[in-house]
């Protein structure tokens, strides 16, 4: 069936209610557009499991702080729609800001305590409330479905999972692996901001995380020692400014006293205009 572009909440609800009534389950991929291979891997995962696939494209003002790149955030709806059509998406939901926030500034927000406050939340204190609020709205609009999120935004995935459980949302939250450029840089819509020199320097974040993982695999169990090894590599790259590196429990995102179980190494660094984030997993049996 041909792809449909829907701008209205009521129209999307009616369309998906008809699908579910006909026995067709729904896979949902929320995005802010400017799609790349990472987004398309989420679509592919949804396509493989669900009769109908919906992609939302909405640059959510709530998750940008004053001074961040809301106005400059890359947008190309025609190109995104073409990519979605080629990938077998059934519906692109592309609402206006007025459709999503008809009263202007929202009076109701969703805050996921604890897990939102560390790492990304420490640098961008209002970010996760903006994400959780729009994702809760999107879950209410799309209705029962499986929703696909990339592991690149690992903390976002943890926040969304926690919100879905806390609010009993009828949503199966599915995390999908990071898609990388050949040199290891995690794909991101904001990578277009990198100039040539910054682009060449950017994989340092991934190399630092790999170094941390290798040290754990070699037997290191002190989180501070792993952090120091990762930070050293980023500090040696003049074009990268370290924000944080950490080793955390993969579910709670708490830093354990001694490393054990399923862990995630997280990192963020400013490289020119974009703030790059990345992560890798490691399990200590
Ligand atoms: O990951 C993103 O692109 C956004 O944070 C999301 C989940 C679509 C909410 O705006």
Image (cartoon, rainbow, N blue to C red):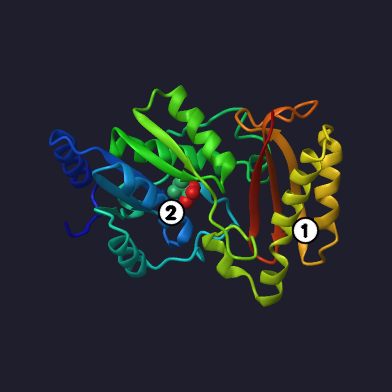
- 190 shown above or below 124: below
Q: Position of residue 215 (x, y in %)?
A: 81, 43
In three-dimensional space, the C-alpha distance between marks 2 and 1, rounded to whole angstroms, equals: 30 Å
**Identity of the residue drawn at 63% across and 70% down:** 194
**Identity of the residue drawn at 18% across and 46% down:** 11
The quarter of the picture where the C terminus appears is top right
Q: Nearer the viewer, mark 2 or mark 1?
A: 2
Q: Quick check: can you spot residue 209?
A: yes
- 225 shown above or below 86: above
Name the residue nearer the viewer: 76 or 257.
Answer: 257
Neighbor class of circle 1 (other Cα within 10 Å; few <14, some 14-19, many 20+) is: some
Quarter-wise, where is residue 193 in the image?
Answer: bottom right
Marker count (numbered): 2
- 39 shown above or below 225: below
Quarter-wise, where is residue 57 in the image?
Answer: bottom left
Q: Residue 241 got which mark? A: 1
Q: Position of residue 143 (x, y in %)?
A: 28, 35
Q: Position of residue 120 (x, y in %)?
A: 64, 44
**Identity of the residue drawn at 38% across and 40% down:** 147
Q: Position of residue 59 (x, y in %)?
A: 43, 55
Q: Residue 41 got which mark? A: 2
Asked if disc 2 is less than 8 Å from ligand 1, the answer is no
Quarter-wise, where is residue 186 in the image?
Answer: bottom right
**Identity of the residue drawn at 44% across and 51% down:** 60
Q: Secondary structure at mark 2?
A: helix
| Relative to 197, 44 lies left or right | left
The quarter of the picture where the N terminus appears is bottom left
């Amino acid at each position: 069936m041909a792809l449909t572009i829907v701008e209205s909440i009521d129209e999307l609800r009616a369309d998906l209610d008809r699908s579910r009534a006909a026995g067709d389950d729904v896979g949902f991929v929320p995005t802010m557009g400017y799609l790349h291979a990472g987004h398309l891997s989420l679509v592919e995962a949804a396509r493989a499991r669900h009769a109908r696939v919906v992609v939302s494209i909405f640059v959510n003002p709530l998750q940008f702080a004053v001074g961040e790149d809301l106005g400059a955030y890359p947008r190309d709806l025609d190109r995104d729609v073409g990519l979605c059509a080629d990938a077998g998406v059934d519906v692109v939901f592309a609402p206006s800001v007025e459709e999503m926030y008809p009263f202007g500034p929202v009076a109701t927000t969703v805050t996921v305590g604890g897990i939102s406050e560390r790492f990304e939340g420490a640098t961008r204190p209002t970010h996760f409330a903006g994400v959780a609020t729009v994702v809760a709205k999107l879950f209410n609009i799309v209705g029962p479905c499986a929703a696909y999120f990339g592991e690149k935004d690992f903390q976002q995935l943890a926040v969304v999972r926690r919100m879905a459980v806390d609010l009993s949302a009828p949503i199966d939250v599915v995390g999908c692996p990071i898609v990388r450029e050949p040199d290891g840089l995690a794909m991101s819509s904001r990578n277009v901001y990198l100039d040539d020199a910054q682009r060449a320097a950017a994989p340092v974040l991934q190399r630092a995380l790999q170094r941390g993982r290798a040290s754990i695999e070699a037997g290191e169990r002190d989180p501070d020692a792993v952090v120091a090894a990762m930070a050293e590599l980023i500090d040696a790259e003049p074009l990268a400014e370290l924000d944080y590196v950490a080793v955390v429990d993969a579910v709670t995102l708490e830093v354990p006293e001694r490393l054990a179980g399923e862990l995630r190494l997280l990192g963020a660094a400013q490289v020119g205009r974009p703030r790059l984030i990345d992560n890798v997993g490691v399990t200590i049996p």
